[in-house]
Amino acid sequence: MLRRIHLWLQRAVLDVPQLAEVVPTLRQAARLYGEGQYEECLSQVMAVGRKLEESRAAQPTLPPL
């Protein structure tokens, strides 16, 4: 999931630079995953996913996650 969101963001942020605001949360999720804190990581990833889905609703030209 982390990799999928990362790859999606790499493409989407070119069209919608405001999406970059989720990068710190995504980095924190990756750090948590690396530390074996999987529940906390999942919580962060879900928060990012919700934010990106909201952005997609506002910007229908963005590709699906």
Image: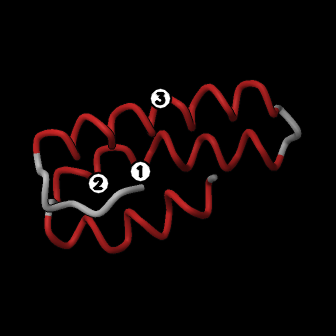
Q: Is residue 40 left or right of residue 18?
A: right
Which residue is disc 2 drawn over?
A: 20
Residue 45: image quadrant is top right
Give the amino acid type for the residue marked by disc 2 in the picture: Ala
The answer to which of 36 and 3 lies nearer the viewer is 3
The answer to which of 64 and 50 lies nearer the viewer is 64
Residue 6 drawn above or below residue 14 = above
Marks 1 and 3, Cα distance to the nearest angstrom? Answer: 12 Å
Q: In this view, does 12 lie to the left or right of 6?
A: left
Residue sticking out furthest to the right: 36
Work out whether mark 1 precedes mark 3 in sequence or the reverse, and give the earlier one. Answer: 1
Looking at the image, is mark 3 or mark 2 nearer the viewer?
Answer: 3
- Label 3 CA crowd tier, 10 Å (few <14, some 14–19, many 20+): some
Which residue is disc 1 drawn over?
A: 23
Q: Which colour scheme is used?
A: secondary structure
Asked whether the beta carbons under mark 3 and mark 2 sit within 8 Å of each other, the answer is no
Q: Residue at x 25, y 34 (%)?
A: 54
User: Where residue 43 appears, x then y in whole percent?
Assistant: 62, 25
Looking at the image, is mark 1 or mark 3 nearer the viewer?
Answer: 3
Asked whether the beta carbons under mark 2 and mark 1 sit within 8 Å of each other, the answer is yes
Which residue is disc 3 drawn over?
A: 47
